[in-house]
Structure formats: C-alpha cells, structure tokens
Image: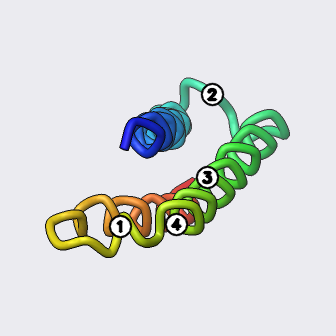
Amino acid sequence: MHAIKNQLILLIIIDLLIVLLFALRILNIIGAGLSYGVSGIILDMLVVILSAYIIKSNGSYLQLSGKNVYKYFVYGSAFLIFLP
C-alpha cells in the first residue's frame, strides 16, 4: 500500500507540472519554442510510463472494491498528455 501511495503522489506531481506548463503557455509567459515542446513531450512520456507501471504492478489492488477512484485517476492522468 505504501508503494502505490508514493507512485500516485509522483503521478500527481507530474500531472501538476503538465498543467503548469500548459498554463504558462496559455498566459504567454513562455513561448512555444523547442524547450516547451521537449519538456511537454518528456512529461507526457513520464505520465504514460508511470501510469502503465502503476496499472501493471498494482492491477490486482486497483481492482478491489472501493479502489476504483485510484484506477480512474491513473487512466485520467493518461488523458492529460493531450493537453499541451
């Protein structure tokens, strides 16, 4: 249980970084240059890799009754990659 909590916290941090990067781009604080694209792609790959790892390593735990919130959060995080 402790390991999945750490993994979910890491996923939340990466998700927040993606949203922050998107917000900075919308507010024109950073340009749409190469660094924006590269950092977005790296964060997107981290989300996909971490989401897949969480689902694979904790699949039986996520199937338990009452744990569906975690499962939907992990799946929802994967959709954030389409944001920036």
- Residue indicated by mark 3: 50
The residue most toward the left is: 66
Which of pointers 4 and 3 lies earlier in the amino acid sequence? 3
Q: Is mark 2 on a helix, strand or loop?
A: loop
Q: Locate residue 11, reporting x and y percent.
A: 49, 43
Residue at the spot 55% in from the left edge and 36% down from the top edge = 21
Crowding around mark 4 (Cα neighbors within 10 Å: few <14, some 14 to 19, many 20+) is: some
Which of pointers 4 and 2 lies earlier in the amino acid sequence? 2
Q: Is residue 65 left or right of residue 31?
A: left
**In the rendered image, which quarter is residue 49 located in?**
bottom right
Circles 4 and 1 in contact, beta carbons < 8 Å: yes
Circles 3 and 1 in contact, beta carbons < 8 Å: no
Going by the numbered disc 1, the residue's amino acid type is: Leu
Label placed on residue 19: none
Circles 1 and 2 in contact, beta carbons < 8 Å: no
How far apart marks 4 and 3 lie (CA) works out to 9 Å
Camera-nearest residue between 68 and 28: 68
Camera-nearest residue between 27 and 71: 71
